[in-house]
Image (cartoon, coloured by chain):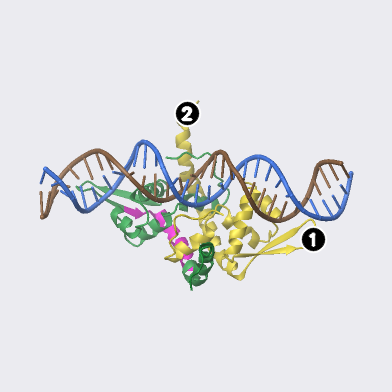
Chain colours: A green, B yellow, C blue, D brown
DNA sequence: TCATATAGGGATAAATTTATCCCCTATTGT
DNA sequence: ACAATAGGGGATAAATTTATCCCTATATGA
């Protein structure tokens, strides 16, 4: 694994939650596991934009942080199932709150977010 | 500014909120502005681990996304004040929820987070 | 015999984000 | 004349995170 050169701050609750939830796909992983998609292959299908590799890595970190558990079935082909721990369950309402805010303001958010990207695309002359 | 090469997903609320809240210091900036630290120099004192430069950049993004406004007073030396917009205020409860979860579970979080760093430090022989 | 499904990891490249360093403006006080 | 204050920005380096590519293993079905 990558070894940090800059030590993180762990002063307040925001620092702490950041340490376990940062990572492009972690919140989605927690959410999909929460709603019942437990196997790695399912999760990969649900999050097709992430590579297999990165999902594995982020799942492992979630496991190390005690938010999910990994159960291995000794069968061939191999079968693995992730579940939220009790601790992991406690963060679900917070994730729900994040998603809800995003949903409630989606029109406005899409507008302001696209304004950035689009305005730079306007360097290309518009054909009317 | 840096021009993205990978276009972001904006499918769900989680994607959308991620676009505006990601950034190492953004949540803290919003929080400190919320509780009344409005001037850049104050914010820099409150977040000493961030460089001036990065705070400016992230404040600008928050402004572009409509979460904060920037008021310039035409005096010398210059005076600037940031405030949350109405829209920005709506995200405060979400940030509060994040911080609260982190605070509630801080012991456990500190433990699992430090386990990573510390266990690699144990390559160095312990002197008892 | 060969492709498929399942889960995973090493090595390395690319993308992205943060950090550093140095420079600019104009007034006030020493 | 010069430092201090307050806010800001360009260029570039460093840190960090993601993505790509390729390889392992085993049983099943065509």
- Please tell me whether the stretch drawn in magenta is mainly helix, strand or loop: helix
Q: Residues within 10 Å of mark 2 (few under 14, many from 20)?
A: few
Q: Looking at the picture, how far across and down is residue B118, in whole percent?
A: 48, 37
Q: Secondary structure at mark 2?
A: loop
Q: Looking at the picture, how far across and down is residue A117, in whole percent?
A: 51, 62
Residue A77 seen by the camera: yes
Picture quadrant of residue A25? bottom left
Q: Secondary structure at mark 1?
A: loop
The reply to whether the magenta stretch includes residue A95 is: yes
Residue situated in front as seen by the camera: A30 or C2: C2
Q: Nearer the viewer, mark 2 or mark 1?
A: 1
Picture quadrant of residue B77? bottom right
Q: Do the residues marked 2 and 1 share a common chain?
A: yes
Identify the residue shown where x is 50% and y is 40%.
A4
Picture quadrant of residue B95? bottom right
Q: Looking at the picture, how far across and down is residue B40, in whole percent?
A: 69, 55
Q: What's the magenta region?
A: A82-100
Q: Which residue is mark 2?
A: B124
Residue B29 seen by the camera: no
Total labels drawn:
2
CA distance separating discs 2 and 1: 56 Å
Q: Which residue is mark 1?
A: B75
Q: Is residue B78 left or right of residue B107?
A: right
């Amino acid at each position: 694994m990558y070894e940090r050169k800059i030590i993180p701050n762990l002063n307040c609750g925001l620092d702490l939650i950041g340490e376990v939830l940062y990572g492009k796909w972690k919140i989605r992983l927690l959410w999909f596991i929460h709603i019942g998609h437990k196997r790695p292959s399912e999760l990969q299908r649900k999050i097709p934009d992430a590579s297999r590799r990165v999902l594995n890595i982020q799942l492992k970190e979630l496991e190390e942080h005690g938010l999910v558990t990994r159960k291995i079935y000794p069968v061939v082909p191999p079968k693995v199932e992730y579940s939220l721990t009790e601790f992991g369950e406690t963060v679900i309402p917070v994730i729900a709150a994040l998603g809800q805010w995003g949903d409630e303001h989606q029109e406005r958010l899409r507008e302001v977010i696209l304004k950035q990207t689009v305005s730079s695309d306007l360097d290309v002359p518009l054909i009317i």
